[in-house]
Amino acid sequence: MTLRAVKPQHETRRRILDAAEELFMQHGFEGASMRLLTTKAGVNLAAVNYHFGSKDALIEAVFQRRLDPMNAARLAELDRLEKEARGKPLSPEAIIRAFIGESLSMIEDSRNGGRNFVRLLGRTYTEPSKPIRTLIGGMYAGTMERFKAAFARALPELPSGELFWRMHFMFGTLSYTLAATDTVQLIAGFKPEDRHDSRALQERLVQFLIAGLLAPMPGSSSNTVRKAA
């Protein structure tokens, strides 16, 4: 009698998450059917229900698996920088780098699915789905508050309402960049061999975001809010 090898439960769960991540990125949340998912993951519907209970819970797990460690890494970097600053405000550039670096580094991660996830994240930001955007907003809430506080200390002359809008525009720019990782090499001056080079992309994005963050106030005659430190 030959015994069939039983795969560990955590491996089955991982395969379902990997398959869901890729299919949601390719087809959207509505377009990725459970039939496609079970075929891609090599499991039956009972296995999906056992591990996640519903498609909505599976979607939440897909984002939680990546966003929780991503946000933890962002906060850890911000903590490190603030500790080194010994009570002094950070430069706007340092805060921007702490926020965007972790997500951009995932563009190079094709082996463990990071590239699929950043494309999924970008698609989520650019396609209307209120429940999912609300879900992601809740996952980001604590992180965004910490970074908003850091920016407020770095730019005390910037009114709170104006800071809110500039962070909104910054986040939108990052979202679009993530959504366009397959076409970013078409931008003038971006070499094809740098297509997934997160460092080259980060430098371009950082300088663009700094310029926006320090732009003149509406109706102001000054050149910038202040010079980047």
Image (tube, rainbow, N blue to C red):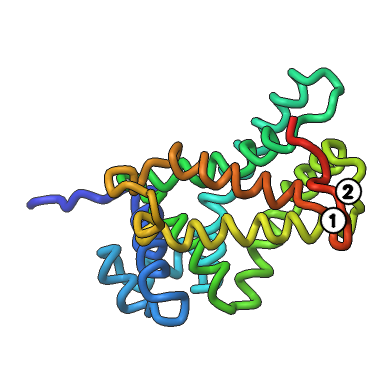
Q: For label 2, count other residues whose C-alpha is less than 10 Å away and answer few (under 14), some (14-19) or many (20+).
A: some
Amino acid tagged 1: Met
Q: Quadrant of residue 207?
A: top right
Residue at the front extreme of this rendering: 221
- Indicate the secondary structure of the residue bearing disc 2: loop
Of callouts 1 and 2, the N-terminal one: 2
Asked whether 217 or 114 is in front, the reply is: 217
Which residue does the image show at 46% across and 44% down from the upper left? 201
User: Could one spot residue 139 in this view of the protein?
Assistant: yes
> Relative to 55, is 184 above or below?
above
CA–CA distance in space, label 1 to label 2: 8 Å
Answer yes or no: do the residues labelled 1 and 2 have beta carbons within 8 Å? yes
166 relative to 48 in the view: left or right: right
Pick the front one: 221 or 153: 221
Establish if 130 lies above or below 100. Answer: below
Give the mark count.
2
**What label does residue 158 carry, if any?**
2
Relative image position of residue 29 (x, y in whole percent): 47, 75
Could you say which quadrant of the image residue 150 lies in?
A: top right
Counting from the top left corner in percent of width and height, residue 190 is at 37, 49
State the mark number for residue 217. 1
Residue 13 image point, x, y percent:
40, 55
69 relative to 194 in the view: left or right: right
Q: Residue furthest left?
A: 1
Q: Residue at x 52, y 50 (%)?
A: 66
The kind of residue tagged 2 is Leu
Residue 16 visible in image: no
Residue 88 at x, y percent in the picture = 85, 24
**In percent of the image, x 68 and y 69: which residue is there?**
134
Quarter of the C terminus within the rendering: top right
